[in-house]
Image (cartoon, helix red, strand yellow):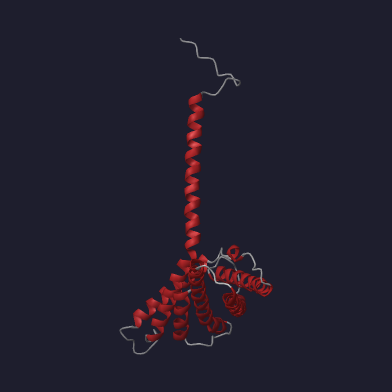
Amino acid sequence: MDALPPPPSPHSPIPTANIQKLYSTLKLQISRLDTHIAHLNRLLKSTPHLDALLATTTYTLTLLTSLLPSPTSKPPLPTTHLSTHLTALTTLLSNLRITLRLFALPNLLTTPPHDPYLSTIAYLQFGASATFQVLENMAHLGDMGVLSVAENRRARWWLWCSRAWAVSVALEGGRLGRELVISRRGRVERDDKGRGERDEEGEEKEAKIARAVERERWWTEVLVNAAYAPMTLHWSFEGGLLPEGVVGALGMVAGGWG
């Protein structure tokens, strides 16, 4: 019977082939991890666009449903089943939007502007938006059965969540107003400068393009904020203030241009 080979000494060097194999495995796993992180980053960056698409679709369905006969209408009409299915789909998409916002709280952290008025508005808006996000998360998790919360408490959370949103929208109006003041002040300064010395033609053209883009951005945000304002008030009161068709139309504007 052949003698067994002696066990390797704990002090013997690791074979080079094993080291290279281990290095290759670690390199492959790190590259896969990097790929997963990059994919997650792309998903997080595309979330606002996805939310805008879902919002537009949800509020379009809300408007369409409001134009159809009620599912409880007597006698039943051919469109009754369609109305029922659209309502269910609207609820599903709405819950999906809220679920996607569950981890949106860190996205609220931004660098405050240098302007003291805009900086104050930014801090207040962060407080209102954070309050909205926390209350919405708790109310949604309660509705989904993740949290054991009484129905009347969840209803209060939804109301105060909407009121916090209304405060944030009002502050957004203040921010847009302050930006308008700063923009007009800059226009006066440019006019005064133009009387003294003339800028280079290329720089002036680029500046005009930049101002046009900024002006378009400002008007878009004004439109979206104006559409959200009555919606936040609607949900801030029990039973609401607006018909579902009006909510759907306003939501289409906010989602389509947001």
Considering every residue shown, the one lying at the far left of the view is 78
Residue 97, how many percent across, how many down? Answer: 49, 69
* Residue at 33% in and 83% down: 79
Instruction: Please tell me whether residue 23 is drawn above or below residue 50 in the rendered image.
Output: above
**Relative horizontal placement of residue 78, taking residue 97 as reference (left or right):** left
| Res 35 seen here | yes
Residue at image point 64% right, 71% down: 122
Q: Position of residue 172 (x, y in %)?
A: 59, 77
> Can residue 168 be seen from the camera position used here?
no
Residue 115 rendering spot, x and y as whole percentages: 66, 71
**Residue at the far top in the pictured view:** 1
Closer to us: 74 or 178? 178
> In terms of depth relative to the viewer, which is nearer, 131 or 183?
183
Classify residue 127 by image quadrant: bottom right
Q: Position of residue 140 (x, y in %)?
A: 55, 70
Q: Residue at x 38, y 79 (%)?
A: 84
Count of numbered badges drawn on the protein: 0
* 5 is higher (above) or lower (below) than 152: above
Q: Residue at x 50, y 81 (%)?
A: 227
Residue reaching furthest bottom?
74
The residue closer to the viewer here, 194 or 250, is 194
Q: Quadrant of residue 180?
A: bottom right
In the rendered image, the vertical position of residue 75 relative to residue 5, given as above or below? below
